[in-house]
Amino acid sequence: MTSKRTGYILGAIAAAGVTAAAVAGSRVQLPPSHATNQGQFIKASTAPIFAPPPGAPMSFAEIFEKVSPAVVSINVTSRVDTSQLRRIPGFDGLPFGGGGGGDDEGGGPPAGRGGGTDPRGGGAGRGPTQQSAGSGFFISADGYIVTNNHVVENAETIKVVMKDETELDATIVGRDEGTDLAVIKVKGGRNNFPFVNFENAGKPRVGDWVIAVGNPFGLGGTATAGIISAYGRDIGDSFVDYIQIDAPINRGNSGGPTFDIYGRVIGVNTSIFTPTGGSVGIGFAIPADVADVVTKKLVSGGKIQRGYIGATIQNFTADMAEAQGLGAQKGAIVSDTVPGGPSAKAGLQPGDVIVSVNGVPIKTSTELTREVAKAQPGDAIKLDVIRDGKHRPVEIRSGVRPSEKDLATNDNTGPGQERGNPATPPSAPHPSVLGMSLAPLDEATRRRLNAPPDLKGVVIESVEANSDAGQKGIRRGDIIVQAPVGHPISTAAEVAAAADAAKKAGRPGVVMGILRAGRTTFLTLKFVPG
């Protein structure tokens, strides 16, 4: 499974834990006449003594002995999805943040997590079996184990290997694609498994030591250590603010625990950032409070439901705000609404800029997704939106968010995600605006582009490579449907008028709605100086 670009790699399907440069202590040279805690004096020429840095344990051995029996290796047999065979073998990719193509309330599943045919459901795409490995840990004496969803999502058989090399069969209890968490349970009816607990009260600080135990490269029972590097990392997932740790996560460690120095689980390892495919010391773990809530619900047989407004959104960028005269306004801009969905029924419109949800300020599309997700189906979600430069309230009755796989689109490539793809200019001349040659959306063009009969807009016939439109990936066949935001257009003259008005107002460009493959993306197209 491949990454779309150099970036986050899911350690799972060959996942690996968190290895850090665990410095148990460091040698320090005491200066002359420095008193030791025994009240004795040593000289500078005396051999260095071994002492830990402030706050560091002399050794992680006691922690490891305490918690390692609860950590397991997970060996999975799954069916190869033939639709994935063109991907680079052995990689689970995770794109960095959101692209210009927009997100469906934060986006679909990261590459490598979704897709494929569930072997338990049958159907096309079934191929030969394959073996993969991950990590997990017991959270109860009766055999419930937490791991990553991407470790077990397509499993036909699951084998759990304990520290003493005992092998046990396991089955899936529940999975949550949105947080990449899963719970499995071993068979056999035992009620004496060693287990560990999530830490929800005391939160380690950035710089505090952590230790991870897992199954990197199939080397079960491996301990590694490092520090917490940061909190609140957004790596493209919709519902998780990750903990960043400097301990490397390697293949086989996904789903394994990160412990504090008291042996409490503070995170579930899930991914790394890498330019090479190997660890560079930037790893990410799902925080314990998130994992605790989700896994308890899965264990109880509950289904994870999240709020849903039925809108495709993207970040409202600084360029867009400047082009609309909105200063430093931040938020999420609505690209499209689902026909008949909650947003459409409530009157939310493409081009609306959402700046708060239930009174909570919104700076990005990811923040909007997370706030909406907190709602239960049927709850009222109160939005503050900017339309035509004015604030107005919109109240939406929340629906139920579909699965991440259902939200994924076949074509994730939109304007703003490619660099330059100018089409060959047509033989007939067309009006040119901002480096784009425009043509009417007539019946012949509708048939060629398979456009709906009621769609209004103008077709882009060619793009100048050195224009801002060309650099942002706009190409022949794209359709301009709004110029500027909130103003539907149907002629090239209307696009030109929008550009002229923006230039006279001293703005750097025009925010336009560009439709491709049924999906609208808003982009700021800037004027070329000169």
Image (cartoon, helix red, strand yellow):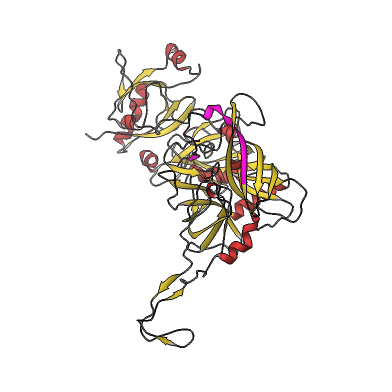
Q: Position of residue 68 (x, y in %)?
A: 62, 58
Tell me the quarter of the image containing the C terminus: top left
- Residue at 63 percent across and 31 percent down: it is 118
- Residue at 29 percent across and 30 percent down: it is 467
Please tell me whether residue 87 is drawn above or below residue 457 in the rendered image.
below
Q: Position of residue 415 (x, y in %)?
A: 41, 30
Q: Is residue 14 left or right of residue 377?
A: left
Which is more toward the observer, 393 or 125? 125
Query: Which quadrant of the figure has residue 221?
Result: bottom right
Please tell me whether residue 252 is drawn above or below residue 498 in the rendered image.
below
**Residue 179 visible in image:** no
Q: Is residue 79 magenta?
A: yes
Query: Which quadrant of the figure has residue 317?
Result: top left
Q: How many marks?
A: 0
**Residue 212 visible in image:** yes
Q: Position of residue 427 (x, y in %)?
A: 30, 13
Q: Position of residue 86 (x, y in %)?
A: 48, 28
Q: Is residue 357 left or right of residue 420?
A: right
Q: Is residue 150 magenta?
A: no
User: Which residues are drawn in magenta?
Assistant: 74-95
Q: Residue furthest right?
A: 189
- Residue at 61 percent across and 63 percent down: it is 65
Please tell me whether residue 361 is drawn above or below residue 263 in the rendered image.
above
Which is more toward the observer, 401 or 341? 401
Q: Is residue 466 left or right of residue 268?
A: left
Q: Residue furthest left?
A: 530
